[in-house]
Amino acid sequence: EVQLVESGGGLVQPGGSLTLSCAASGFTSGNHAMSWVRQAPGKGLEWVSGIRGSSSNTYYADAVKGRFTISRDNSKNTLYLQMYSLRVEDTAVYYCAKEPYIGVAGSFDYWGQGTLVTVSS
Amino acid sequence: QSALTQPPSASGSPGQSVTISCTGTSSDVGGYNYVSWFQQHPGKAPKLMIYEVTKRPSGVPDRFSGSKSGNTASLTVSGLQAEDEADYYCSSYAGSNNVVFGGGTKLTVL
């Protein structure tokens, strides 16, 4: 059974940093692309960042480029999102999501339960 | 990376059919057959309902179907049931390893 479990969310001040983790199980993580998708309170879904399976190729939405870093440790089946220079508008539930392919395409077949990041002074 | 356009709301009575549209451009919806639809109930994570425009994952009822014409994709829910009431989001591959979502549609079962 595929499971994705996020952790690391919390309250952080504007300009601060936070690292999210997503522990994956039930599939060979190196064979699948992974992404982070966020949802601000009462708003829609927004793709944040993606990473190809078995490689270090990474991709970012314009809104977070240069401030967020996605990475993965396939030996630990864990996906990460390092977030720097956080802004109030980064406040959201952050989901990790798995692709059925090795590349990023938006066909997210499994999602975690989400972790809430609140940026506020 | 502009969001795809969805109607904010849609509704239908039990047993009826409803179609939700998702309009993009030739750079996303119209350019690739990687359009997906997700169902999200309040407080829950999204669930994949349709991928690659028309394909249904295992376990998704065949009452859900997808299609695409030009730059507009559509999700049709036939034989509406009370549990279909939820928010629905489309997504599309947008080239250069980017993904774009629609703004979401709140489906109400009357």
Image: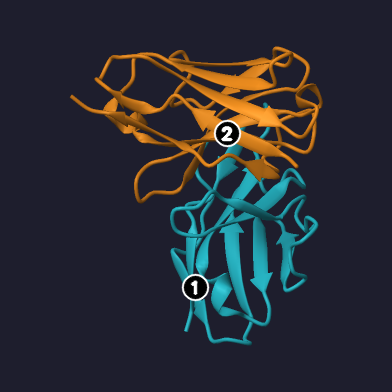
Chain colours: A orange, B cyan
Q: Residue at x 59, y 64 (%)?
A: B21
**Label 1 secondary element:** strand
Amino acid type, callout 1? Ala
Q: Which residue occupies the foreground of this view, B6 or B71?
A: B6
* Residue B22 drawn above or below residue A101: below
Circle 2 packing at 10 Å, graded few (<14), some (14-19), many (20+), is some
Residue assigned mark 1: B10
Amino acid type, callout 2? Val
* Residue B83 position within the rendered picture, expressed as x and y whole percent measured from the top left: 56, 73
Q: Residue at x 44, y 53 (%)?
A: B43
Do we see residue A61 in this rendering?
yes
* Residue A106 position within the rendered picture, expressed as x and y whole percent measured from the top left: 67, 40
* Residue B46 position within the rendered picture, expressed as x and y whole percent measured from the top left: 57, 50
Q: Residue at x 36, y 14 (%)?
A: A17
Name the subunit of mark 1.
Answer: B
Report the residue that reaches farthest toward the left.
Answer: A121
Q: Residue at x 58, y 27 (%)?
A: A22
Mark 2 vs 1: CB contact within 8 A: no
Residue assigned mark 2: A5
